[in-house]
Amino acid sequence: EPEVTQTPSHQVTQMGQEVILRCVPISNHLYFYWYRQILGQKVEFLVSFYNNEISEKSEIFDDQFSVERPDGSNFTLKIRSTKLEDSAMYFCASSQGTSDQPQHFGDGTRLSIL
Amino acid sequence: RKEVEQDPGPFNVPEGATVAFNCTYSNSASQSFFWYRQDCRKEPKLLMSVYSSGNEDGRFTAQLNRASQYISLLIRDSKLSDSATYLCVVNGAGGSYIPTFGRGTSLIVHP
C-alpha cells in the first residue's frame, strides 16, 4: 500500500535555528497538508497545499513557517527562528481530493528545540 | 463552544465488550467526517469515513446525526489491539475546508 514518508524521524535543533522537514506524499495525491501535535495535545492543522500554492492556513501558520514543493515528489515545511514551543510532532498528510476525501498521514517528524 | 468535542475517557472495557464514542461538532455546515485511530506517539491512521446513511466496516460502525450535530463510533467484540486513542475529524467545522481534530477518546481493552 502506498504511503506518505517523512524525514527525518527526529530532529534536534538549537533555538533560533532554521529547520526543514521533508515529506514525500502518495504519488497520485493532489492535496498536501502539514499538522503539528504538541505532546499530550490534539492534532492541529497548519497548512494545506494544492496546485503549487497554499489553499488554507491556520492562525498557527504565521511568517515563521513556509511550505514548498521543490520538485515533483517532495513537500517541505520550513520553520525559521525556532522557539522552544515549536517542539512537537509534525505530520505530513496527503489526499486525492479536498474535504470529502480522507487524508493519509506520514509517521511524523519529532522536532525537539533545545 | 469548542468546534469538535470528544469525551477524553479513558474507556476501560474487557475484551469482547461493545463500546461507543460520540463526537459533537459546532458548525452545522460541516461537510465531511472521519474517525482515525492514533496509537501512542504514532501518526493518525484512518479508521473510516462517516457517511450520512451510516456505514459499517467489520466490527466498526459509524453514524452521523446532522440534526444533533454529532457522529458516533461503535466497536463490537473489542480486541486488545483496539486499545488506542480514537480521533474524530470534521472538515468544515470552522467554516472553511480546514480539518478540525477532536482531542481524542482513549480506549483501553483489557483481558
Image: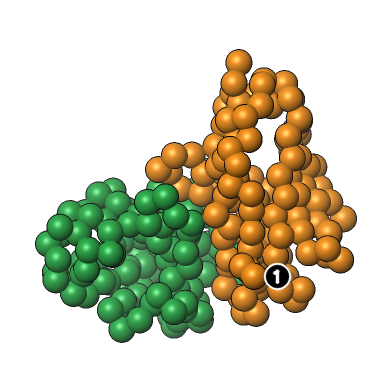
Chain colours: A green, B orange
Q: Quadrant of residue A14?
A: bottom left
**Rendered position, A40 above or below A32:** above
Whether residue B67 is situated above or below residue B80 in the rendered picture? below
Report crowding for label 1: few under 14, some 14 to 19, many 20 or more residues within 10 A (C-alpha): some
Q: Position of residue B78 (x, y in %)?
A: 69, 26
Q: Is residue A61 above or below residue A89?
A: below
If the image is split into quadrants, where does the C terminus of chain A sit? bottom left
Task: Write the residue at 65% across / 79% down.
Answer: B95
Q: Amino acid at mark 1?
A: Ser
Secondary structure of the residue carrying numbered label 1: loop
Q: Position of residue A40 (x, y in %)?
A: 42, 50
Q: Where in the figure is residue B37, as x and y percent of width and height?
A: 57, 44
Q: Chain of mark 1?
A: B
Count every numbered label the image shows and give the total. 1
Picture quadrant of residue B59 = top right
x%, y% of residue A10?
Answer: 25, 49
Label 1 sits on residue: B26
Residue at image x 55%, y 37%? B84
Q: Is residue A50 rendered to the left or right of residue B5? A: left
Which residue is located at x 40 percent, y 61 percent? Answer: A36
- Which residue is outermost to the front? B1
Q: Residue at x 44, y 82 (%)?
A: A53
Q: Is residue A53 left or right of residue B35?
A: left
The answer to whether residue B31 is above or below residue A62 is above
Residue A81 visible in the snapshot: yes
